[in-house]
Image (cartoon, rainbow, N blue to C red):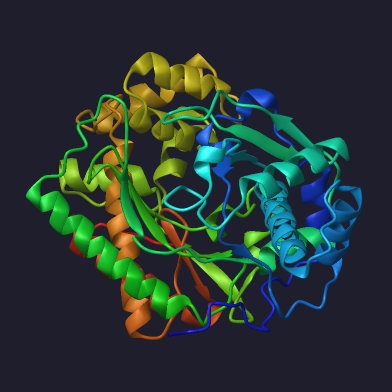
Amino acid sequence: MHNTSINKQAVYKGGKELLEEIESSHTRYENQKDESDYNFFFSAHLKPNIYSESNALNVMVKNVLDDSDYQPKQEKYLKEYIKHIELILLNLCKCVMERSWCKIPMDAGAFGADNDYPSLSFRHFTRVIKTLEGMGFIQLIKGAKYSEGGQRSAIQPISVLSGRAVYIYLESADIAKPPFAKVTKKPGIDSELTESDEIQLKQDMEDLARLNEFLLPHSWAAKSSMTRIYSGKVGRAGRIYCSFQRLPQRRIPVRSNCLINGEPIVEVDIKSSHPRLAVALFYNKKLSRTFYKDIELNTGVFQGKVKAFFQYAFSCDSRDKALNAFRRCEPYGDEPDFNAVEKYVFSIYPELPYYQGWAIIAMNYEGEIIKRVMLEGMESNIVVLPIHDAVAVQEKHKAWAEEVMVRVWNDVVGVEACEVG
């Protein structure tokens, strides 16, 4: 069995200014706390890098301990309490890095044996939260009484953490226990597994257990276990998830400044992923590599808005919902732009699954493709990290990743129509 601790290799090559930029706008509005894109559930598996030379986390722990009304003299109880402080602080560092709320349990029923957090103490946990709130360090929004389906409380830091403290999260590891594949409940969706569903889920569990075992001795930023999550039933969503893919990239290029086993990385993505998949499945054709640019030239609508049109046309189950989402997107879209793109793409590909919520199926294809690429990486002793419709590998493995991604995509979809970049 491999050691689950992080090794001594660096995981980040960027400057402190990037981390300071993250901290300058790290909070979310209260009305965003229940949006899945802007929250995560508290992790009890986060561990700091034992090789880190920084004492930033120790300083923060001491500050909380000094402000706490609990100062046990017995070393056993003190260590247990410090463990809770450290764990909550690491989750708050994750809040800053992902610019998200952390959903926390505040009911005794979630703690102890046979519950969600068997290794944590409800008294210690709530004592730390109360102390942090009293220090003015966190914003706490209490949820409904905790019960099955109940709404959890949510926290995010108010006080800005130091850049070095946030770096602690990049060095941390979140190694969970199996199973690594699951089907989440979805209202209105029959989640009863068929025989073929059981076979697929069992295969996912075996594949991801092997992948996670292979990845244990390797290092990368925000290290965590890989999981495959289906929405409501097998075949819906089904992407591969990990903490690394949630690191900032568009607004602040943190992810591209990270390292795998101490070496620079490159991302290889599927060009125009959902439109490419749809055209291959519904028309048995290969989409142009410059598809979004081609539409811009024919409609005068910028590529960013063209991409947004397809995002909402494939993810929403009605035209009205897609248009409303498009209006709110960045760059801000308006109805004439929406209509112009719609008219053009309907003229060339009228049979694509617009306004049917089809993205949930496309995501499942992406999950299967990325999983198979990761498995081939494992067989070649190459670390492959998933980023939804893309992968990150060490720069020296870029050509390998491009070749494997194209071959696996064509095999899974059944049409030779993949383009990567």
Q: How many labels sit on residues?
A: 0
Q: Quadrant of residue 126?
A: top right
The picture places residue 218, in percent across and down from the top left corner, at: 53, 80
Give the image quarter of residue 130.
top right
Q: Residue furthest left?
A: 195
Q: Is residue 4 above or below residue 301?
A: below
Left or right for 237, reference 52:
left
Q: Tell me the quadrant of the picture where the C terminus can be found.
A: bottom left
Q: Nearer the viewer, residue 302 or 326?
A: 326
Q: Is residue 251 something one can see in this rendering? A: no
> Viewed as shown, does residue 29 lie left or right of 399?
right
Where residue 41 appears, as percent x and y from the top left, is 54, 44
Q: Nearer the viewer, residue 144 or 416?
A: 144
Q: What residue is drawn where x is 64% and y is 34%?
A: 154
Look at 62% across and 28% down and name the residue there: 32
Whether residue 106 is visible: yes
Of 255 and 37, the residue lying toward us: 37
| Residue 356 percent coordinates (x, y) | 27, 26
Residue 143: x percent and y percent? 60, 26
* Residue in front for this viewpoint, 421 or 22: 22
- The N terminus - image quarter: bottom left
Q: Is residue 367 above or below residue 137?
A: below
Q: Is residue 210 above or below residue 138?
A: below
Decide: is 408 above or below 94.
below
The answer to whether residue 265 is left or right of residue 361 is right
Q: Residue at x 59, y 81 (%)?
A: 261
Residue that lies at the very extreme toward the front in this rendered image: 74
